[in-house]
Image: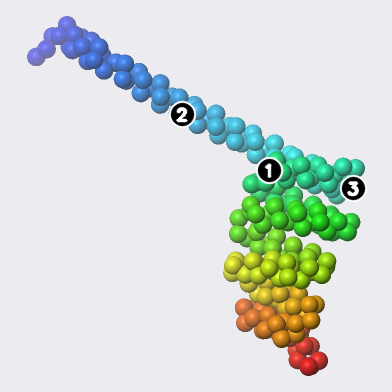
């Protein structure tokens, strides 16, 4: 059995051979741990700042403050990949349409179409299609409406909107097919009434 002195010598020898590696490992471990905590804190701080900016943008738009649309557009540009920016884009588009600024509405919704996750992107597809329809940009509106079909819950709504666009374009045959597709997809809207009105007028 080893004496205490021998045990101490073994520990000293082990530490002499492996001590630097152990210290380095501890340093790296603590660095990763505190680095992650720092990153997490920074991320939360950034999210909180984005939330505050979002609320400020919405208040400015709703209260019709001077420069509110410019502030909203700046927020979208700085945060294009964030959900807060996508929600702000919807508000900006609504505000722009109310002021007959269709170009700004189309641009804001395009940002969502380019960057958002599928469900929000589909909403932007449909809203942009309606704005383009109001401008009688039928082909571009139709493309936007079709894009929303890829998200299952929006398929019926997208088909019905395509029917509206095709009907406005004068394509009754295409409109009839689109309304029928909306009905087949489970439309809870006016697709059946619209389809019947085309049949009655034929």
Q: Answer whether residue 164 is visible to the viewer in this image.
A: no
Residue 117 in percent (x, y) is at 60, 55
* Residue at 23%, 10% in the rendered image: 12
Mark 3 or mark 2, which is nearer to you? 3
The label shown at residue 33 is 2
* Above/below status of 7 relative to 41: above
Residue 168 in percent (x, y) is at 80, 77
Q: Are marks 3 and 1 in contact (CB under 8 Å)?
A: no
- Residue pushed farthest left? 1
N-terminal of the pair, mark 1 or mark 2, is 2
Q: Nearer the viewer, residue 60 or 138?
A: 138
Mark 1 or mark 2, which is nearer to you? 1
* Above/below status of 152 relative to 94: below
* Residue at 73%, 70% in the rendered image: 139
Q: Residues within 10 Å of mark 3 (few under 14, many from 20)?
A: few
N-terminal of the pair, mark 3 or mark 2, is 2
Q: Secondary structure at mark 1?
A: loop
Q: Answer whether residue 138 is visible to the viewer in this image.
A: yes
Residue for badge 1: 79
Q: Residues within 10 Å of mark 2 (few under 14, many from 20)?
A: few
Residue for badge 3: 64
Q: Secondary structure at mark 3?
A: loop
* Residue at 68%, 54% in the rendered image: 112
Q: Taking 131 as reference, is 29 left or right?
A: left
Question: CA gap, disc 1 to disc 2?
Answer: 28 Å
* Above/below status of 195 relative to 94: below
């Amino acid at each position: 059995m080893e004496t205490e002195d021998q045990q101490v010598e073994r520990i000293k020898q082990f530490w002499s051979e492996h001590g630097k590696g152990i210290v380095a490992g501890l340093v790296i471990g603590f660095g990763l741990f505190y680095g992650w905590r720092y990153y997490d804190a920074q991320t939360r701080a950034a999210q909180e700042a984005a939330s505050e900016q979002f609320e400020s943008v919405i208040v400015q738009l709703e209260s019709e403050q001077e420069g509110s649309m410019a502030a909203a557009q700046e927020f979208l540009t700085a945060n294009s990949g964030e959900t807060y920016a996508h929600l702000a884009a919807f508000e900006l588009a609504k505000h722009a349409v109310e002021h007959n600024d269709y170009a700004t509405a189309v641009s804001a919704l395009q940002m969502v179409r380019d960057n958002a996750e599928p469900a929000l992107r589909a909403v932007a597809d449909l809203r942009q299609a309606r704005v383009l329809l109001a401008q009688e940009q039928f082909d571009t509106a139709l493309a936007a409406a079709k894009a929303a079909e890829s998200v299952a819950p929006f398929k019926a709504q997208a088909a019905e909107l395509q029917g509206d666009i095709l009907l406005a374009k004068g394509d009754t045959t295409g409109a009839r097919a689109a309304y029928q597709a909306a009905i087949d997809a489970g439309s809870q809207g006016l697709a059946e009434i619209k389809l019947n009105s085309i049949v009655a007028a034929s």
